[in-house]
Image (cartoon, rainbow, N blue to C red):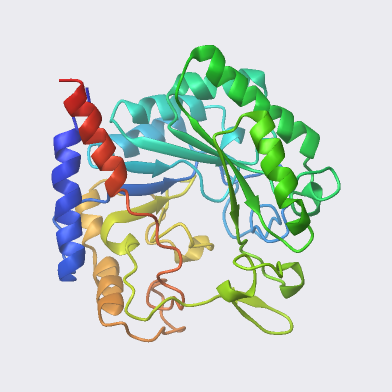
């Protein structure tokens, strides 16, 4: 029984109405959140600011007490949570308790992990926690290709850990979490896609997804579409994702928020630098923050589809790629919640 479901439903449709009407002042709350349990990682992936220790954010583990405080504020409205952002979530020993606490608010929860820490014990805790979906980031299908990007990791280890999770799920007789193998397609691993499909089936994961990476060097890009150049603006030395249609709305400003491991709040999951956060600590009065001058300025800029101003102190005003980091529409998640609720009556 999800006692917050009706509140979530009303908030969702109110937020969607505000977004459709291009309202600046909102009476709704976010229904989507990216929450970072850890701004640290045990791998050294070349294009990740955390793995490369660029110092864009303080190294921090989200405290369980702070997580509960945030959930008590936003939980009644949230439909979905990405319990990950800039680090490896399983490095926080409280992550399993975080999932269990968030589930008391009836939130659909997904984690992305590099799977290096997903041993048998962790796998059992993941299944027991009630997690809805887990994405295993495994970019390769052999010991030769995998560590080229996932520096410090071992393909044999993470593949065994994937099987650990499948086994734990079967042993518990659980339908969750949905287990997805995510394979970032680079030039060096593109030839292993068929092998990865075979290995995914043998391991028993629920699905495998091949996706273009956020690669900052054209030499890394796949020459197989749809994983290569069609997604990027490329010159001889750099790569950036193509800007979406100028009239595409950035949905984060109306229905989503990102909370970092130190409690600071960002406009979206793509805000790399701590200096661009909207606030350095989670606000005591979130409604007031949600309609603060900086949020109103950001919404007005996007509504008017104004060109980016690189001199602005507002991260949304200087953003030149709104739209490409939009989160998915959680409407189908809400529909499933409502269906299950009706079936239980």
Identified at 40% across, 56% down, the residue is 327
Quadrant location of the C terminus in the rendered image: top left
Query: In screen coordinates, is 1 left or right of 244?
Result: left
Identified at 31% across, 71% down, the residue is 249
Numbered circles on residues, count: 0
Give the x, y percent position of residue 192.
Answer: 76, 51
Closest to the observer: 311 or 22?
22
Give the x, y percent position of residue 317.
Answer: 37, 77
Query: In screen coordinates, is 109 left or right of 158?
Result: left
Identify the residue at the far right of this view: 144
Q: Is residue 106 above or below residue 224?
A: above
Closest to the observer: 319 or 278?
319
Say if residue 74 shows up in the picture.
no
Quadrant location of the N terminus in the rendered image: top left
Identified at 24% across, 57% down, the residue is 290
Say if residue 202 shows up in the picture.
yes
Identified at 41% across, 75% down, the residue is 313
Closest to the observer: 173 or 312?
173
Q: Is residue 135 above or below residue 23?
A: above
Give the x, y percent position of residue 138.
Answer: 68, 44
Give the x, y percent position of residue 53.
Answer: 69, 55
Query: In screen coordinates, is 176 left or right of 184?
Result: left
Q: Is residue 78 above or below residue 54?
A: above
């Amino acid at each position: 029984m999800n006692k917050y479901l009706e509140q979530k439903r009303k908030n969702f449709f109110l937020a969607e109405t505000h977004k459709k009407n291009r309202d600046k002042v909102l009476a709704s709350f976010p229904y989507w959140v990216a929450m970072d349990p850890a701004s640290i990682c045990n791998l050294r992936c070349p294009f990740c600011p955390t793995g490369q220790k660029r110092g864009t954010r303080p190294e921090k583990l989200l405290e369980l007490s702070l997580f509960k405080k945030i959930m008590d504020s936003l939980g009644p409205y949230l439909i979905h949570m990405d319990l990950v952002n800039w680090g490896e979530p399983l490095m926080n020993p409280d992550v399993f308790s975080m999932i269990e606490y968030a589930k008391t608010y009836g939130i659909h929860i997904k984690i992305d992990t590099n799977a290096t820490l997903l041993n048998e014990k962790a796998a059992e805790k993941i299944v027991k926690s009630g997690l809805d979906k887990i994405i295993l980031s495994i970019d390769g299908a052999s010991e030769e290709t995998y560590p080229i990007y996932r520096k410090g990791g071992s393909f044999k280890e993470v593949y065994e850990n994937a099987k650990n999770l499948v086994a734990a799920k079967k042993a518990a007789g659980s339908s969750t979490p949905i287990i997805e193998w995510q394979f970032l397609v680079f030039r060096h691993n593109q030839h292993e896609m068929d092998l990865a499909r075979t290995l995914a089936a043998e391991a028993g994961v629920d699905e495998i997804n091949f996706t273009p990476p956020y690669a900052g060097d054209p030499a890394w890009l796949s020459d197989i579409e749809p994983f290569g150049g069609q997604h990027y603006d490329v010159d001889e030395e750099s790569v950036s994702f193509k800007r979406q249609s100028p009239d595409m709305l950035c949905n984060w400003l109306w229905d989503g928020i990102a909370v970092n491991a130190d409690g600071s709040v960002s406009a979206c999951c793509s805000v790399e630098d701590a200096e661009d956060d909207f606030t350095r600590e989670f606000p005591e009065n979130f409604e007031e923050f949600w309609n603060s001058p900086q949020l109103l300025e950001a919404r007005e800029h996007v509504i008017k589809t104004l060109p980016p101003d690189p001199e602005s102190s507002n991260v949304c005003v200087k953003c030149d790629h709104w739209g490409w980091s939009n989160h998915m529409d959680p409407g189908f998640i809400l529909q499933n919640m409502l269906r299950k609720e009706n079936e239980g009556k």
